Image: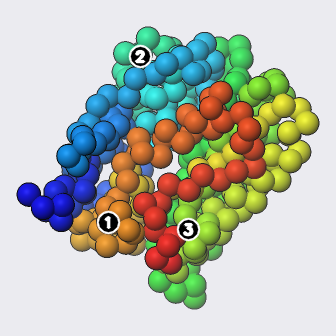
Amino acid sequence: MSDQEKPLTAYPSVEIEAQDQEGGPGLDSKMKPAANWTQLEFWSNDGQPSLKEYEGRGLLQDKAVLITGGDSGIGRSVAILMAREGADISFVYLPEEEEDAQDTRKYIEKAGRKANLMPMDLRKNENCQKAVDGHMKAFGRLNVLVNNSAMQEMCDDLKDIDLDVVEKTFRLNILAMFAMCKYALPHMKRGSSIVNSCSVAGYMGNPQLVDYSSTKGAIATFTRSLAQQQAPKGIRVNAVAPGIIWTPLQPATKGNPAENMKGLGVGAAPLNRPGMPIEVATAYVFLASPYGTYFTGEVIHGTGGIEMQG
């Protein structure tokens, strides 16, 4: 077999089917094929890929982590990996995502850690306060905050954009992040960290996701600004900017035709495939752990090289 004929990845890529979950919150359980949240890709010396389960080494032993949008996609993978690193996990999700949330709970508990599930809509400021209070009641400490909740709806022309949708997008993607940090920081001590979910769209823009892209650009600036403010207190603030990742946000995006899911990401970036949640979740672990102690105000890009083709 020539190098050109060898598989480019052990993860699903060209196998992704045409599908949609429009009108719903987006569930991991309905995705075909399933995403990968727990397995790392290894390569043999003759260029053959294989998958092995992520094994923790105690990088977050006995820490307490609060994750928004932790039921599915990248958030689920972050929750599982951090649990395997020794952390107890609280995560927030929409009530209609209960099926995915219970699956995530099982992964956390299988890792030998405690899971605290909090179904609520973070577009309400009072729920952001309730999320932090609920976490503190469960664990009594807050070492890592992961702001991951987000929404997006496609619109081809700004003249047709629904301003109510724009407001909802800003409310969840960036304003809720302000609220979560505001309520979390009084409980965070030196050595604690915040990791925000940014996006390649915040750097390249996206003509069909003008409002979503704008929120992600705001998150990058928010991250840099808050990092400067909190550095003297010993609290680090960073972000991860994923590219095209196989998560429920993709098939659930309103205005995104089901056919667009087939072969998602193929031809869009040098690696010629979508990423799997675990492939960027490892960056969150890095930033929250002792590996990332000299990182603050940084945004790690996990895009398969897509920005080189922008």
Q: Earlier in the sequence, mark 2 or mark 1?
A: 2
Location of residue 261 in the rendering, given as x and y in whole percent from the top left corner: 28, 65
In this rendering, would 96 be left or right of 260?
A: right
The label on residue 201 is 3
Residue type, mark 2 in image = Ala
Closer to the camera, 119 or 213?
213
In this rendering, would 18 be left or right of 54?
A: left
In this rendering, would 270 be left or right of 161?
A: left
Closer to the camera, 153 or 292?
292
Question: What kind of element bears circle 2?
Answer: loop
On the question of residue 87 being in view, the answer is no
Q: Which residue is mark 1?
A: 272
Question: What kind of element bears circle 3?
Answer: helix
User: Looking at the image, which residue is at 71% across and 13% down?
Assistant: 140
User: Looking at the image, which residue is at 40% across and 23% down?
Assistant: 55
Location of residue 17 in the rendering, given as x and y in whole percent from the top left corner: 19, 60
Q: Which residue is mark 2?
A: 111
Residue type, mark 1 in image = Asn
Q: Earlier in the sequence, mark 2 or mark 3?
A: 2
Q: Where is the N terminus found, in terms of image quarters?
A: bottom left
Q: Does residue 90 lie above or below 154 as drawn? A: above
Foreground mark, 2 or 1, reads 1
Q: Does residue 211 lie above or below 190 as drawn? A: below
Which coloring applies here? rainbow
Q: Does residue 251 lie above or below 39 as drawn? A: below
